[in-house]
Amino acid sequence: MNKKPLVSCIVIFFNAGEKFFIEAIESVFAQTYDNWELLLVDDGSTDGSSVIALQYAEKYLEKVRYLQHEHHQNRGMSATRNLGIRNAKGEYIAFLDADDVWLPQKLEQQLAIMESNPQAKVVFGSTQFWYSWTGNPKDSKRDRIRELGIPSNGLFHPPKLLVLLLQKKKLIHLLLVAY
């Protein structure tokens, strides 16, 4: 029996586009932390995204599940994310957008933080904006890591983090949430 906590990785998608969607999915498979499930949650896609998701779910029955709204409806991001959450089996939930990728140690590093700080409910971090994927030299100058403008490596008790974020007028990606 695996004693490591299960992480439910939820990727919602709507007409995600083949290249980016596959890269996002593969970045989950590339994780150094291996006790995860991947929920690919379809928000009524009309392109080839549904086929890609179904292929992964069929190929990796033990790790990947395909979910969709009744009648393949488009219900929006919140309803689609909630569908994933309702079907998650993990102790932790991690969200990944269908056009983003995770670095290989993302889950391992964030789980270590969560496990060593049981009072923490959320782990977050900076986002790297990567434009140089286009191969255009001008785009490589646009690559950057968005600084959050708040202290890192700290534990914030409610509502301190929200107040800090509102003061800085910054948005963050919630990367790992315990429930």
Image: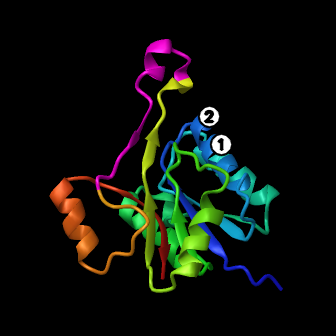
Please state which amino acid type lies under the numbered disc 2. Lys
Magenta region includes residue 164: no
Residue at x-position 46% and y-position 42%? 128
Query: Residue 99, position in %: x, y?
Result: 52, 42
Mark 2 nearby-residue class (10 Å; few <14, some 14–19, many ≥20): few
Query: Residue 27, position in %: x, y?
Result: 66, 49
Closest to the observer, 81 or 23: 23
In the displayed structure, 25 sits above or below 140; it is below
Please state which amino acid type lies under the numbered disc 1. Ile
The circle drawn on residue 170 is: none
The residue lying furthest to the left in this view is 167
Q: Quadrant of residue 36?
A: bottom right
In the shown orientation, is residue 102 left or right of residue 37? left
Residue position marked by numbered label 1 in the rendering: 22
Residue at x-position 79% and y-position 69%? 62
Count of marks, rendered view: 2
Residue position marked by numbered label 2 in the rendering: 19
Q: Which residues are magenta?
A: 134-149
Any part of residue 30 in sight: yes
In the shown orientation, is residue 159 left or right of residue 41? left
Quadrant containing the N terminus is: bottom right
Query: Residue 65, position in %: x, y?
Result: 67, 65
Closest to the observer, 109 or 28: 109
Mark 1 nearby-residue class (10 Å; few <14, some 14–19, many ≥20): some
Query: Residue 110, position in %: x, y?
Result: 56, 66
